[in-house]
Amino acid sequence: MANAATTKLGCAFHVCDASGIRNLSFVCIRVNIGVPLYNIGEPCSGCGGRNNGKCISNALCNNTGLYGQ
């Protein structure tokens, strides 16, 4: 899970096939640890300003290209 202020998230996985048993490890790291996971409010109410009001499916803000990537 990531909070509403998270703009960067790093994830990795590793598959281990030892002794005929497949084990999958998956982990994610995010910035802003300790900040609440979500902001209370209407869906897409925070999409204005830097995101030019882009809202996906009337639910989530589109942050694509937020840092010029």
Image (cartoon, grey):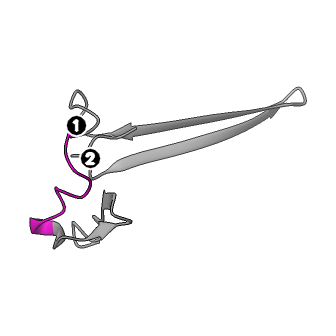
Q: Which residues are magenta?
A: 39-50
Q: Earlier in the sequence, mark 2 or mark 1?
A: 2
Is 58 colored magenta in this rendering?
Answer: no
Is 48 colored magenta in this rendering?
Answer: yes
- Kindly identify the residue that appears in the image at 26 percent across and 40 percent down: 31
Q: Looking at the picture, which amino acid does disc 2 mark?
A: Thr
Residue bearing the label numbered 2 = 6
Which residue extends farthest right? 20
Residues under numbered marks 2 and 1 in contact, where contact means CB atoms less than 8 Å apart: yes
Q: Quadrant of residue 69?
A: bottom left
Q: Is residue 21 above or below residue 43?
A: above
Quick one: SS at disc 2? loop
Q: Quadrant of residue 45?
A: bottom left
Name the quarter where the N terminus is drawn. Answer: top left
- Kindly identify the residue that appears in the image at 21 percent across and 46 percent down: 5
How packed is label 2: few (under 14 Cα within 10 Å), some, or many (20 or more)? some
Q: Position of residue 61 (x, y in %)?
A: 28, 61
Residue bearing the label numbered 1 = 32
